[in-house]
Image: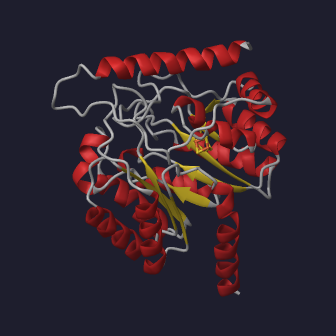
Amino acid sequence: MPERIVETRSRKLRVLQAEREATGEPAARPQFQPKPDWIRMKMPRGEVFFDLKQRVAELGLHTVCESASCPNIGECWNRRSLTIMILGGICTRSCQFCDVPTGRPLPPDPNEPEHVATMLAELGLRHTVITCVDRDDLADGGAAHWAETIRAVKRRSPELVLEVLTGDFKGDTAAVDTVLAAGPDVFAHNLETVPRLSRQVRVQASYARSYTILRHATERGAITKTGLMLGLGEELDEVRAVLRELRELGVHILTLGQYLRPSPKHLPVARFVTPAEFDALKAEALALGFPHVESGPMVRSSYHADGQRDIVRAIQGQRQAARG
Ligand code: SF4
């Protein structure tokens, strides 16, 4: 049996074991919930998957697909679709939903922008998402490194539609301007949850600050995108209120997906939102006027993001025509 499969299985066993142990937790915390059959994960396997994994390692890159234990990795990587995570593999924050390791990160790797550009040029993608860990230790939150990365990618792959999924830069709108000046096609920042749960879910962040970042990028003329995880204890009416607010703001692309608990150390799933509820929310969001909505149990902000290429190009085309 290949070593990597053994590694994956033993990790899975450790998680299962930990989940079993979690059933002895205090009564206040919900017990392990079996996943409904609409939550489907493909085992990561196949030549394309392992080739990609090897190339990511050779270039010393990180991906959120691996670091956040994304359940879609088996599917996405076999479509040669991955989300590179820049500024290292250690995050300065400790969001309660996220599996990316928290700690004291190393200084940004000056070679990372070129390595990201090389990887994406090799893959020959038409659309991709790059994200980052939060770097509260850096004076600019990593904005200059972001800009360098965007420019390197655009130089090597001028036709690529590039979406950047950033943190909140502690509310520093000048950092957002630095990122936007490098010319990404889409600026994304996730609200993650409704205002009432924001502090609990994203300990060092706030809904208001994230909203400010999105508003700033939208007012600067960026094509903007955000995402929410459902199943954390929010009411559907709270979600609807956020959707209305986002639409009034002019956010273009919305993703809604089911929160899945990466380990017993993370927030428990409050409930599994049904596929019918996701469909209904998508219809409501489209009726509000969002140009594009991805909504479903397995949706993540970068899941099938390549399907958003046409809408991004269409919005850019309309804007160009309006400018004459
Ligand atoms: S959904 Fe996004 S993070 Fe998850 S495997 Fe796919 S590309 Fe990676």
Q: In which quarter of the image is the C terminus?
A: bottom right
Q: In this view, does 140 lie to the left or right of 212?
A: right
Q: In this view, does 249 lie to the left or right of 301?
A: left
How is the rendered protein coloured?
Answer: secondary structure
Q: Where is residue 171 in the image (x, y as percent from the top left)?
A: 36, 50
Return the residue nearer the eye: 19 or 138.
19
Q: Is residue 95 above or below residue 166?
A: above
What residue lies at 64% left-to-right and 14% top-to-bottom? Answer: 6
Q: Position of residue 195 (x, y in %)?
A: 26, 56
> Residue 204: which quarter of the image?
top left
Q: Where is residue 167 in the image (x, y as percent from the top left)?
A: 45, 45
Return the residue nearer the eye: 4 or 151.
4
What residue lies at 36% left-to-right and 60% top-to-bottom? Answer: 212
What residue lies at 60% left-to-right and 57% top-to-bottom? Answer: 181
- How many numbered marks, from 0 up? 0
Ligand 1 appears in which quadrant? top right
What residue lies at 66% left-to-right and 84% top-to-bottom? Answer: 323
Return the residue nearer the eye: 11 or 106.
11
Q: Where is residue 86 in the image (x, y as percent from the top left)?
A: 59, 36
Q: In which quarter of the image is the N terminus?
A: top right
Extreme-front residue of the structure: 37
